[in-house]
Image: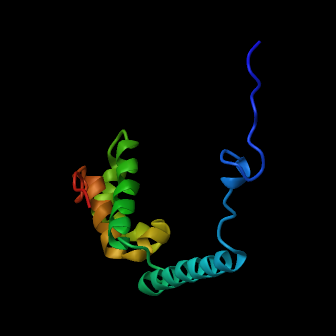
Amino acid sequence: MPGMVLLPGPGQPGDPSLARHSGPSRRTRLIASAVGAAVLFGGGGLLVRQYNDRPPRADDIAYESGYLYSNRIRQGDPTGELVEKLLSGECVLLERDGYGGRNATFNPALWIEGCLDGAAGRPSREQGLVG
C-alpha cells in the first residue's frame, strides 16, 4: 500500500494561498486608467488639429482615386469612345460635376491628373514605390 500523501496546510510552503497576488489597488488602477485615457484623447486631439478634415496623404488619395476611376472606364470600354472623351476633357467635367466624390475634393487638380493618366493607360505615378 502506498504511503499517504499529505497536502500542505494553510501557511505552509506549497500552499496555493501563498502564491496569490492581489494586484494593484483600486486607486492605482483608476489613476493609470485616467492617465491612459488622457494620453489617448490628447493624441487624438493632436491628430485632429494636424489633419482636421483632410486625411494624411490626401494628395495621393486624390490622384489614385482619379486614376482608378478612369482606369476602370478604360478597361470596360470595348470601342475606345469613352477613353477618347476622357482624354479630350471629360475628366475635368466629371470632377466639376462631382463624380470624383469626396476624394477629389482633397486636391481636384491631382484627381484630374490621375484621371488622365488612367485613361491614357500610363502607370500610376507612385506605382511600385513604398512609403
Residue 109 in picture, x, y percent from top left: 31, 74
Q: 51 or 109: nearer the eye?
A: 51
Q: 113 or 60: nearer the eye?
A: 60
Would residue 78 appear left or right of 36 to someone viewing this image? left
Would residue 36 appear left or right of 107 to someone viewing this image? right
- Look at 49% across and 68% down and name the residue there: 101
Residue 23 in picture, x, y percent from top left: 66, 65
Residue found at the far top of this picture: 1
- Which corner quadrant of the image does residue 95 belong to? bottom left
Q: Is residue 92 above or below residue 64?
A: below
Q: How is the image coloured?
A: rainbow
- Which corner quadrant of the image does residue 57 belong to? bottom left
- Look at 37% across and 68% down and name the residue there: 62
- Name the quarter where the C terminus is drawn: bottom left
Residue 127 in picture, x, y percent from top left: 24, 53
- Look at 33% across and 65% down and name the residue there: 63
Residue found at the far bottom of this picture: 49
Q: Is residue 52 above or below residue 102?
A: below
Q: 99 or 9: nearer the eye?
A: 9
Q: Is residue 70 above or below residue 41?
A: above
Residue 47 in picture, x, y percent from top left: 46, 80
- Name the quarter where the N terminus is drawn: top right
Q: 92 or 112: nearer the eye?
A: 112
Would residue 87 appear left or right of 82 to someone viewing this image? left
Would residue 22 appear left or right of 90 to someone viewing this image? right
